[in-house]
Image (cartoon, rainbow, N blue to C red):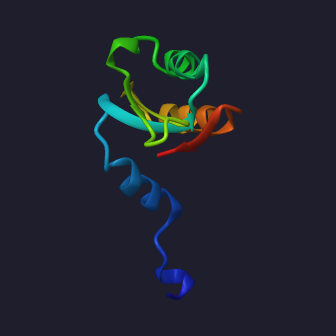
Amino acid sequence: MPAEDAPAPAAAEARRASLLEFPCAFPIKVMGRKQDGFVHALTQLARQHDPDFDAATVELRESRQGNYLGVTLTVTATSQAQLDALYRALTSHPMVKVVF
């Protein structure tokens, strides 16, 4: 596609941002080794980015052999910037293997 036909960066960002309507409940799935403090660390990170985060809504799922733990955190998303910051915090945490 020629450069003059490429969408403007602002237009592309507006399209991406329009996929979500804020505020909304937004589930984030995190996987890491099953170890003491893992779920607590994740809930603390969620609470830093969503002060009203309710840890009672956390869903847990062990791997087949019990070595890993899948955790679903449902946050109240208020902006794309908030979600991006939370994803960065989660992916950089040493206990976290994958965020999706």
**Where does residue 89 sit, x and y in percent of width and height?**
63, 32
**Where does residue 52 sit, x and y in percent of width and height?**
40, 11
Residue lying at 32% horizontally and 19% vertically, measured from the top left: 57
27 left or right of 82 in image: left
> Looking at this rendering, what residue extends furthest in the front direction?
65
Q: Is residue 96 above or below residue 52?
A: below
Residue lying at 50% horizontally and 31% vertically, measured from the top left: 82
Q: Is residue 79 above or below residue 41?
A: below
Residue lying at 53% horizontally and 88% vertically, measured from the top left: 2
**Where does residue 6 sit, x and y in percent of width and height?**
49, 77
Callout count: 0
28 left or right of 21 in image: right
94 left or right of 97 in image: right
Q: Is residue 85 above or below residue 14?
A: above
- The quadrant in which residue 23 appears is top left
> Looking at this rendering, what residue extends furthest in the bottom direction?
2
**Where does residue 97 sit, x and y in percent of width and height?**
61, 42
- The quadrant in which residue 28 appears is top left
Is residue 20 something one can see in this rendering? yes
- The quadrant in which residue 79 appears is top left
Is residue 54 something one can see in this rendering? no
